[in-house]
Image (cartoon, rainbow, N blue to C red):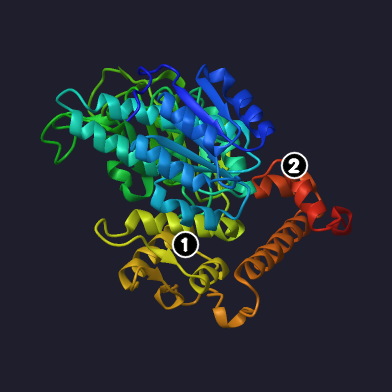
């Protein structure tokens, strides 16, 4: 492995793309990081550079003349097996992810690359290297290495416009401690976004504590969050620190925060306002330094109007809001997610798994009421049923009662790419039109509902020939 940069210091990056303009753009995007960046206009020059000196990170295009990005990665990994890699491409992500799986590509970026997403992924790669290097020494070496390796999966996956918008929003909040409220249906990945924010923040080496507020009874909530003293209540046989104390210096993630009782909301508000709390049964204040990220799948504004959620607390936790779209609104990410889960849950001693055409079509057409969590469970079952290293349509067991999108309903005479493009084009057009209809032609409101910037939503309207005026009443 090439010698990594010193902990906390910028590293060495090799950027490879046969388009000089792309190399220049990537270098400009990363220049604020202080990293030493070398650009190469082709594969042969890149291999010569790798042979001459070590690099910490390789950013390489998928499609190039002379050699493909896959071949460059394979040769680079022969020289440096642990080299971090980010693969770029404007091609179909499902094919890229499948093809790159055997090479162990560290990450994938869809072109056109945005500065925010590129910087986040590069920053995360260097943080990972710091953690793994630190894990090599000291009595906690194995535990730290396990933590570092686990974090490879703690990144929101996808290349759709919706996911790019999420990365842009994450970039805004990683370098400060403002409270974040993540909203979205159950299973959309709210905790994953919270973990991504934490691991890219300055608190990344401190604890990340996740709390499911709906799983803790009201009578125990205060003690769980803030701790208690011995004898404070029946069953309190010892002093105990709460979850806020456990997350001191790091991040506490309160999932389903709308389930908190009004009493617990008062105590939480005090922590946010003054950084102080009291254990149950104690009269002395304690201070705590935490970053709060909250999540809910409920309508908190409606809960405020109905006096079920404190208005002052709502404004405290909702300083910056990130909305996660349901999986059915970003179907183009399904192939990438499916391949990710196929690699993640495949038996370590088994063959690399491939998902065939009809299985992918079945996954894309499904409504996914359980969102990404449901997709992961379906893929785990499919892996158990797969034979010969191939996941087929018969291995995809979908929930009864949801629109399954049977392959029999699709035109299988079309080539896979053409059929996939048709399915996604119809989805995109119907989705944009449906939002405009719901918001009576208000483009800004429709864009907010989609979790997209207004200009990106305009691009979708123009692409599909949709006039917002036709939806106004």
Horizontal arrangement in the rendering, residue 6 relative to residue 28 (left or right)? left
* Residue extending furthest toward the left: 237
* Residue extending furthest toward the bottom: 408
Local packing at callout 2 (Cα closer than 10 Å; few below 14, some 14-19, many 20+) is some
Helix, strand or loop status at disc 2: helix
Residue 472: x percent and y percent?
86, 55
Q: Is residue 313 visible?
A: no
Q: Are marks 2 and 1 in contact (CB under 8 Å)?
A: no
Local packing at callout 1 (Cα closer than 10 Å; few below 14, some 14-19, many 20+) is some
> In which quadrant of the rendered view does residue 383 lie?
bottom left
> Which of the marked residues, 2 or 1, is nearer the chain's N terminus?
1
Q: Nearer the viewer, residue 173 or 460?
A: 460
**As displayed, is residue 240 above or below residue 421?**
above
Q: Looking at the image, which residue is at 19% across and 34% down?
A: 142
Q: Looking at the image, which residue is at 55% across and 78% down?
A: 407
Quadrant showing the N terminus: top left
Quadrant showing the C terminus: bottom right
Residue 123: x percent and y percent?
47, 28
**Residues under labels 2 and 1: Cα distance?**
28 Å
Residue 464: x percent and y percent?
79, 58
Q: Nearer the viewer, residue 349 or 448?
A: 349
Q: Is residue 375 visible?
A: yes
Which mark, residue 370? Answer: 1
Which mark, residue 454? Answer: 2
Horizontal arrangement in the rendering, residue 82 relative to residue 430 (left or right)? left
Helix, strand or loop status at disc 1: loop
**As displayed, is residue 20 above or below residue 340?**
above
């Amino acid at each position: 492995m090439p010698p990594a940069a010193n902990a906390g210091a910028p590293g060495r990056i090799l950027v490879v793309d046969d388009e000089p303009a792309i190399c220049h753009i990537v270098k400009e995007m990363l220049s604020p990081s202080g990293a030493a960046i070398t650009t190469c206009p082709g594969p042969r020059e890149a291999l010569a550079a790798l042979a001459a000196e070590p690099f910490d990170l390789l950013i390489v295009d998928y499609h190039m003349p002379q050699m493909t990005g896959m071949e460059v990665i394979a040769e680079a990994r022969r020289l440096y097996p642990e080299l971090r890699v980010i693969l770029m491409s404007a091609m179909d992500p499902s094919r890229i992810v499948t093809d790159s799986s055997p090479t162990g590509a560290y990450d994938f970026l869809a072109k056109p690359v945005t500065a925010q997403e590129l910087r986040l992924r590069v920053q995360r790669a260097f943080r990972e290297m710091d953690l793994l290097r630190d894990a090599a020494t000291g009595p906690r070496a194995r535990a730290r290495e396990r933590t570092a390796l686990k974090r490879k999966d703690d990144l929101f996956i996808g290349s759709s416009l919706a996911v790019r918008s999420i990365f842009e929003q994450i970039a805004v909040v990683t370098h400060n401690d403002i409270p974040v409220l993540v909203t979205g249906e159950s299973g959309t990945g709210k905790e994953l976004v919270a973990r991504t924010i934490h691991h890219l923040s300055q608190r990344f080496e401190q604890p990340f504590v996740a709390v499911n507020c709906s799983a803790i009874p009201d009578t125990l909530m205060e003690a769980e969050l803030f701790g208690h003293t011995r004898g404070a209540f029946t069953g309190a046989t010892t002093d105990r620190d709460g979850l806020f104390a456990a997350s001191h210096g790091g991040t506490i993630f309160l999932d389903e925060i709308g389930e908190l009782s009004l009493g617990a909301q008062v105590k939480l508000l005090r922590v946010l306002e003054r950084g102080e709390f009291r254990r149950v049964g104690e009269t002395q204040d304690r201070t705590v330094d935490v970053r709060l990220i909250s999540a809910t799948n409920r309508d908190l504004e409606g809960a405020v109007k109905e006096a079920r959620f404190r208005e002052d607390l709502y404004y405290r936790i909702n300083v910056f809001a990130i909305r996660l779209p349901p999986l059915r609104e970003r179907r183009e990410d399904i192939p990438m997610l499916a391949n990710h889960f196929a690699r993640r849950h495949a038996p370590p001693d088994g063959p690399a798994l491939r998902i065939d055409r009809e299985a992918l079509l079945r996954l894309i057409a499904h409504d996914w009421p359980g969102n990404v969590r449901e997709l992961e469970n379906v893929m785990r079952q499919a892996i158990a049923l797969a034979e010969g290293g191939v996941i087929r349509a018969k291995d995809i067991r979908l929930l009864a009662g949801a629109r399954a999108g049977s392959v029999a309903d699709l035109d299988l005479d079309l080539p896979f790419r053409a059929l996939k493009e048709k399915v996604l084009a119809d989805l995109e057009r119907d989705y944009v039109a449906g939002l405009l209809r719901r918001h009576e032609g208000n483009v800004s409101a429709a864009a907010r509902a989609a979790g997209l910037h207004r200009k990106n939503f305009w691009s979708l309207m123009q692409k599909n020939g949709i006039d917002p005026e036709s939806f106004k009443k």
